[in-house]
Image (cartoon, rainbow, N blue to C red):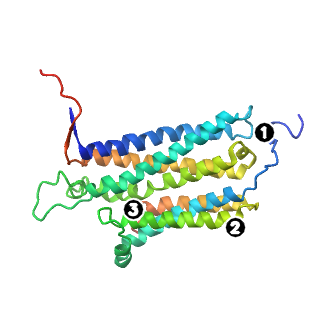
Amino acid sequence: MSAASGDSAVKTPSLTNGPGAAAILSAGIGALALAVLAIVGDKFAAAKSLLVFYKPTGVLSGVTTVAIVIWLVAWGVLEIRWRRRTVALGLVSGLALGMLVLSILLTFPPIADLF
Amino acid sequence: MEISARGLWTLIHGMGFGALYLLACSGALVELFRVTAPSASSALTRGQEQFLKTYLVVMAVLAWSAVLTGAYVIYPWYRAAPSEGMTDLSGFSQRLLLSNPRTAGWHSIGMEWKEHIAWFAPISITMVACVFIRYGRELRDHRPLRTAVLSFAAASFIAAGVAGLFGAMINKYAPVEGGGRIQLSAGAER
């Protein structure tokens, strides 16, 4: 069997990994922003009143809206910066996945109540 | 056979968008894994690639529809406060759950987690769809990118699963009811 056949065969990609890395990292940032905002909105009275964008939905409306804005802005900025670049994707995706896992944990009420 | 207007919205949110998303998510995970596997025996045809792109976009629409109807249509009914002195809490799901120590956890843990974790599903699957639209079959040549995309798709499935599980259980103990009655069929006389 030749070295270029089977599972070890990797073609040279024609697209850089920058745009993909930007999408992944910004998703992690958005998720973490949501988790942090949820805690802030729950623990601080001033933040709670600021985050009520739609009264019937309460704080959740502001928490999710601000998190989505942070996610999209981060995505836009990273996309512009990394559009034609090849980045250290292992590091970036590890960071993004770490933020996602942390976000899931931080939204779990028994953990969120520790703060 | 009839259903309340709020019950119908809950059905649309949970079964129409949420459950359909979960079903679609399991299919997407398998298909993304299969078509982007470095060892895949045959190349993805242009038609298959286009189908998967469309499938992922529909999933993103389903996920956003689920969280938006949940947060802006059903959640206000769920968290509505009864008038002073009101003792019948059947139309006030959150207060009904909190009124009994045996059901309070469905709100304090279930709903409190569900209302936040659910949003990770649309954020993740939107990212997955955008990356696949951009890279398509080339994703198999970017192994770390492929791993991250599959991980986020799996996280999206878990987030939607947690939200769906708690949604179903909360609706079992304190269903969101009220609004007009919608008659689905007249039913047969006995």
Percent of width and height locating residue B182:
22, 39
Secondary structure of residue under mark 3: helix
Q: Work out whether mark 3 precedes mark 1 in sequence or the reverse, and give the earlier one.
A: 1
Q: State which quarter of the image contains the N terminus of chain B.
A: top left
Chain to which mark 1 belongs: A
Q: CA distance from mark 2 to mark 1?
A: 33 Å
The residue where tag 3 is placed is A109
Q: Residue at x 63, y 38 (%)?
A: B50
| Residue A60 showing in the rendered view | yes
Amino acid tagged 1: Asp
Vertical relation: B172 (above or below) A54: above
- Residue A98 shows which numbered tag? none
Query: Going by the image, does A8 lie left or right of B133?
Result: right
Amino acid tagged 2: Arg
Amino acid tagged 3: Pro
The residue where tag 2 is placed is A81
Query: Going by the image, does B111 lie left or right of A69?
Result: left
Q: Work out whether mark 2 precedes mark 1 in sequence or the reverse, and give the earlier one.
A: 1
Q: State which quarter of the image contains the C terminus of chain B.
A: top left
Chain to which mark 2 belongs: A
Which residue occupies the foreground of this view, B132 or B166?
Answer: B132
Q: Work out whether mark 2 precedes mark 3 in sequence or the reverse, and give the earlier one.
A: 2
Query: Going by the image, does B120 lie left or right of B7?
Result: right
The residue where tag 1 is placed is A7
Percent of width and height locating residue A90:
71, 58
Percent of width and height locating residue A84:
75, 61
Same chain letter for marks 2 and 3: yes
Chain to which mark 3 belongs: A
Q: Residues within 10 Å of mark 2 (few under 14, many from 20)?
A: few
